[in-house]
Image (spheres, rainbow, N blue to C red):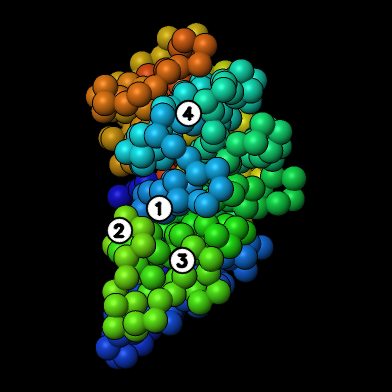
Amino acid sequence: MFYSLAAPSWGPEEIKAIERVVDSGMFTMGENVARFEEQFAKYFGMKYGVMVNSGSSANLVAVASLFYKKDRPLQRGDEVIVPAISWATTYHPLHQYGLKLKFVDVELETLNADMSLIEKAIGPRTRMIVAVSILGNPAAVDAMRKLADKHGLYFMEDNCESMDAEIGGRKTGTFGHLNTYSFFFSHHISTMEGGIVLTDDKELFHILRAMRNHGWTRDVPADTEIFEKKDSDFYEAYRFILPGYNVRPIELSGAVGLEQIKKLPAMTAQRRTNMARFQKLFSGDDRFIIQRENGKSSSFSFTIILNPKRNLNRKRVFEALKKADIGYRIITGGNFLRHDVIKYYDYEIVGGSTPNADIAHDYGFFVGNAPVDLSKQIDTLREVLDRACN
């Protein structure tokens, strides 16, 4: 394809890492995963990392862990504030654990949650805020954390689309009590499939270790306070303390991750170079609404919203993109409230509607970015859209 939604980021180093694991004969979670967890947490300045088999699983065990804290655990029926635009598995674990979701609209220019609505959404049953930085563009996670602390709320960052982004000189995905990342093929680093939760909270770290691995004690560090060890080693080896999952990663993913994390700074720099070209070509053209950078974006992709005031034909645009062999897709998951699955949720919409998320859903799309030079592709994109929207 001339301009794909994603491009591979592996080189010979990743293949050699896989071969080393294959030669070792040890494929399930082991030394490589442990080393990658340590290196990844260190890169982002966090104390603890717990790798799992996907970013979706990272969200699942992160939400679950808050229900098993010794003090102030979440309870079914508690409320959580979420943005109207994100991926499905930002929301599903919250629903699956019985939380009521309070949706806030997004800012049309950043596509992130509208901060002016978040404080209005806080009520007596509200216990948590979930922040999502959309497609590499930092949400106001610094302000959200301050607001959460002010009201005694848990704060969780779903940073699956925005690895290596920054706000106020600090990496996104480090502001939350819990912070999740994805290592899917198209993301900033790829371990085939994979994800991780970062936290500075020792208790949550231990709960997460148990939750990802059957809910048993075997993977929990010896200095834990979430359970007391009993005398019988026979039973202790298969002792289940939490209703957990098997969402362990494999050694192949850990080994690849160790190579990918070395390349992350250079890959992010190339994404930002591509972003600068895109911004130069599309800024100031009122036919197109592009993401206004908040902080320092790590540029997962390039979003384009056809200005509804200009009465442009999105179907015609899609036909032109398809003819030019340019990939395109909905912005993240679009307005989640517009999906069929919402009928199963307990939720409310803060302010009663989400007009900006609807505009992004009905008039928006994104094209790809990748850690390679996309100058030719971005220039062609501009030419194609200019003709289609003339």
Residue at 46% from the left image edge and 12% from the top image edge? 353
Q: Which mark is residue 79?
A: 4
Q: Is residue 338 above or below residue 260?
A: above
Q: Which mark is residue 227?
A: 3
Crowding at label 1, few (<14), some or many (≥20) Cα neighbours within 10 Å? many
Q: CA distance from mark 2 to mark 1?
A: 8 Å
Q: Nearer the viewer, mark 3 or mark 2?
A: 3
* Residue 136 in view, yes or no: no
Reading the image, the residue beneath label 2 is 245
Residue at 44% from the left image edge and 75% from the top image edge? 229
Residue at 49% from the left image edge and 63% from the top image edge? 226
**Sequence-wise first label, 2 or 1:** 1
Q: Residue furthest right?
A: 168
Say which amino acid is labelled 3.
Answer: Phe
Q: Is residue 282 above or below residue 19?
A: above
Q: Which mark is residue 205?
A: none
Reading the image, the residue beneath label 1 is 61
Say which amino acid is labelled 1.
Answer: Val
Q: Is residue 302 above or below residue 290?
A: below
**Sequence-wise first label, 3 or 4:** 4
Crowding at label 2, few (<14), some or many (≥20) Cα neighbours within 10 Å? some
Quarter residue 33 falls in: bottom left
Residue 93 point in image, percent of width and height: 36, 41
Whether the residues at callouts 1 and 4 have beta carbons within 8 Å, the answer is no
Say which element carries label 3.
Answer: loop
**Sequence-wise first label, 1 or 3:** 1
Q: CA distance from mark 1 to mark 4?
A: 18 Å
Question: Image check: 321 left or right of 299?
Answer: left
Say which element carries label 1.
Answer: helix
Whether the residues at callouts 2 and 1 have beta carbons within 8 Å, the answer is yes
Q: Nearer the viewer, mark 3 or mark 4?
A: 3
Q: CA distance from mark 2 to mark 4?
A: 24 Å
